Amino acid sequence: MSRKSRVEVDYDSMEIEEVDVLIEGAEADLKKLQAEKRSTLNKKGLSKGARAARLEPLEEGLTMLRAQLAWLLHIKDGKIPFYDKLPKDNQFYRHFMQNLAATRIRDAAAAKAEDDSALFAGAADDISVERARARGADSPESRKGNLKRELYL
């Protein structure tokens, strides 16, 4: 197999659930190969050479699947944040989670205040434009042509 024909999987962009699916698939394949190996070992009519010939590809497959499974578990372990690996009754875990929650609340409040500030600034601009328009409508020059003009205050 050439290097160009290999399909490269981007594990960095995968979610933990996607890696879990790959792990479950590898475990299922591993169980299948182990069952084939047991059945080959249990066959009575095979000579040692025939048995070794049948076991060799199974052993290679098992070795590759074990390595793949170890790699997938390593990837999954790397994707799990360190604080999720701590025991839930650990003092550091509780302290870290309280600080994390407080930080998230503070960031959300700051973002909301910034949004509200922008909204109020836009409303203040609209009000000042309307006031200027109302003052212009109330001037003596504007009354000459139309006496029924309403005031905007």
Image (spheres, rainbow, N blue to C red):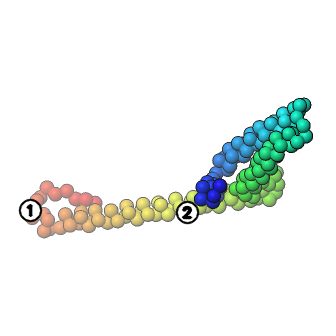
Badge 2 is on which residue? 110
99 over 57 or under it: above or below: below
Front one among 74 and 27:
27
Residue placed farthest to the top in the image? 44
Q: Residue at x 90, y 37 (%)?
A: 47
42 over 126 or under it: above or below: above
Asked if residue 62 shows in the view, the reply is no
Quarter of the image containing the N terminus? bottom right
Circle 1: is it few (<14), some (14-19), or many (20+) Cα within 10 Å?
few
Q: Earlier in the sequence, mark 1 or mark 2?
A: 2
Local SS, label 1: loop
Q: Amino acid at mark 2?
A: Ala
Q: Residue at x 86, y 39 (%)?
A: 51
Q: Nearer the viewer, mark 1 or mark 2?
A: 2
Q: Residue 110 location, x and y as percent?
A: 55, 63
Q: Residue at x 68, y 49 (%)?
A: 19
Q: Report if the CB atoms under discs 1 and 2 are less than 8 Å apart.
A: no
* Residue 96 appears left or right of 117: right
Residue placed farthest to the left in the image? 145
Badge 1 is on which residue? 145
